[in-house]
Image (tube, helix red, strand yellow):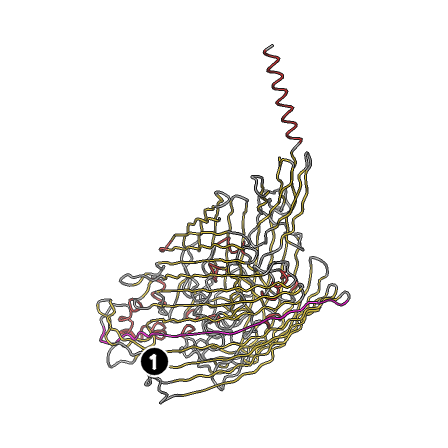
Amino acid sequence: MKGLQVFLSLLTAVLFSFQLIAQEGSVSGTISPINSDEPLPYVTVQLEKTNYGSVSNALGYFVIEDVPSGKYTLTVSSLGYGKFSQEIEVKPGEELGIDVSMEEAVLDLPAVVVESMTLTGGSTGIRDIPGSAYFISPKQIQKFSYTDINRTLRAVPGINIQEEDGFGLRPNIGLRGTGVERSSKITVMEDGVLMAPAPYTAPAAYYFPTIGRMQAVEILKGSSQIKYGPYTTGGALNLISTQIPDKFTGKINLFAGSFGGFNLHATAGNSHEYFGYSVETFQYKSNGFKVLDNDGNTGFDKKDYLMKVRVNTKQDAKVYQSLTFKVGRTFEVSNETYLGLTEEDFNESPYRRYAASQKDQMNTDHTLYQVTHVMSVAKKFNVTTTAYRTEFNRNWYKLSKVTADSGAATVKIGSLLDNPNDYANAYDILTGEENSDDDALSVKANNRAYYSQGLQSVISYDFKTGKASHGLELGLRIHEDHVDRFQWVDKYKMEEGVMQLTTSGTPGTESNRVAHAVAFASYLQYKFRYDKLTVIPGIRYENIMFTRDDYGKNDVERSGANLKTRENQVEAFIPGVGVDYKFNKVLSVFGGVHKGFSPPGSKVDTKPEESINYELGTRYSERSLSGEVVIFFNDYKNLLGSDLAAAGGGGTTDQFNGGEVQTKGLEFQLNYNLFALTTITNFSMPISLVYTYTDAKFQNSFDSDFEAWGEVKSGDDLPYIANNQFSFLLGLEHKSFGLNFSGKYVDEMRTKAGEGDMDPMYKTDAQFIMDASLYYKMSKYASLVLNVTNISNEVNVIARRPAGLRPGMPRAFMLGLKIAF
């Protein structure tokens, strides 16, 4: 009898279990971006207010099993995409199939206004641009957590970079053969606003937005860039800051590693129906990888703070409006120098710093104010208006000249390092090997104060006529910027390897001048789309007034007794047209022609830089395979050079005419998931291959005052432009961990204009640098990360300017913890 009772109990339990199973169902589906069949892997899928959830596999497929029958809210979230939410009902014994299309979240604004506020419209928007464009997504940025913009851009075709300090603090970036000096020949923006300290007057990027706090990066080349002046030859670069989240979220990323490296990135924010906010800080520092004679810190400490507040109507209002306030502050102290090494000393000890650079230090303070109003009427008429002001104060205190003794001539540090045997006594003082007389070492306080302010507005209207769609866009900007140089020179002596102050300079007795620019810019662009054809003609207008007041070295009170004034007014119309034709959903061809322009500054006899630029390319995108091939040709009527101390010049920052130049090249990019055609669904192996060929040559002969050009002959190559560049990204990704590799090869580059075989004394080294990143997700909210840069510990000459040879960053490790909440 007892056995029968046990049997009946077991039978009841089994029948009850079957009844429970019969009351359960499942939810499954695939996830992809809107208007794309490319799968989105490792996306979080959740039934709200339950413990039921899943993560999509490498093919974008997800399944949630054993879900009790009932009604739920399905939510899908992924980095770089807006939150997807849908009400569902799970029925007993059934599998509910859902295909999720996610909208890219480039900005925290309605999708209809994103196109007018960004260069590309995100990864999906690139497909509709009749020109070469690149979007570095939040997911791509997260892979390596770079703090160096040079490394972030290494997989972008058409980029020319000259490294300087190894940390990317003051990058030198060019596009398609433009000059790289302090990124002064491209349009650099943050959230669509000019970010150089004085974009018209002094565009050299001694301040560059902190890449570590950016959410995404856009690069636009070709005819569409005429919207983003004043520099329209090579292209435009826009850094997209962390956006206000749609719900309460935040993160804390903490890294520490080699050379006393430390990084902290913390954000928090939330959005309500009519209000949103975010606060953020990015702080990083290092003791430096160079070794100063007699010890000393050769690193930096940079702190960046940002706050945003937004008030807005309902998202689905007939007239949507928002007002966003953005305030930022950045401080930097870096013990960086222009003083490099001689050839012999570099070969013996490439990371050495001479004793005479022990006082060199850069101090900066950057403040940002920005207010943006957005209005969208019935998703057809949009107006975006931004008022902005930036203030930047910097003093780069650094060695500039050496005097061996009271009867000897003073020599610049660049000449000294190029010819140490000719200046043996000065070299011994520089290295601290010999004591010196008073005032032997001249240390210049390169003290400057900048501001940049303006008001810009973009008005767009979209409409249709029959099967054709049309878009009109008008942009207007009133801009003013200003730079005040108030500098001096302190004199030191060298005593037992230690610099001692002997004469204090008087502020204003070196450079003592003010430069100013007022500019009005506008553009009109029309987009016509019919069936598979898109045509976008446009024209830009720039009207600029440059002025400069030079008070001289003997008027520190600026009474005007010896005032020298000059001014230069420039007016330019900059047309362009781009065409795109889609053969089908996956293959298209595009081309364009536009005028290149760069303003000349206040020097009267300097002409604006002008060129005619052409490009032709094809683009392919189907599921896990995408690629682009572009050929370009830039024909300069007059190339401009900049007299920057950073480029080995005299430091006047004047622009000067460089004559006729032709730049041509090829850009190739291929992206693929190596596991796409296999049965492997738990892993993905994305690979990106990028190649750039650039040939930039002078077309006339002249004798330049700019040291890096010197005596130029027709057919000479431009300096610091690599002929061949190749890079790759390779990853092995799983929902719980990932391993990523990044590598870049760069040809040797001339450091002076020339042709034929390169003189070993006037070139950089060819280099191939590889980085790696490994992460492990400990939970939904926490990950461990290990980053390694320069895996093989390559030692290369990356530059011979500002003065002497400079090395790249040696191998470095960073171990980090990422926490999201």
Question: How busy is the neighbourhood of tag 1: few (under 14 within 10 Å), some, or many (20 plus)?
Answer: many
Using the rendered image of the protein, determine whether residue 326 is visible from the camera's viewpoint: yes
- Does residue 189 appear to the left or right of 381 in the view shown? left
Q: Residue at x 32, y 85 (%)?
A: 554
Relative image position of residue 420 (x, y in whole percent) = 32, 72
Q: Is the magenta stretch mostly helix, strand or loop?
A: strand
Depth check, front residue: 227 or 371: 371
The residue type indicated by label 1 comes to Glu
Residue 464: say if magenta. yes
Depth check, front residue: 63 or 454: 454
- Looking at the rendered image, the quarter that the N terminus falls into is top right
Q: What stretch is highlighted in magenta?
A: 436-465
Depth check, front residue: 454 or 285: 454
Relative image position of residue 8 (x, y in whole percent) = 63, 17
Secondary-structure class at tag 1: loop
For mark 1, what is the residue?
510
Relative image position of residue 496 (x, y in whole percent) = 22, 67
Residue farthest along the right direction in this orientation = 466
- Does residue 526 appear to the left or right of 288 in the view shown? right
Hey, which quadrant is residue 221 in on the image? Answer: bottom right
Depth check, front residue: 565 or 204: 565
- Does residue 24 appear to the left or right of 510 in the view shown? right
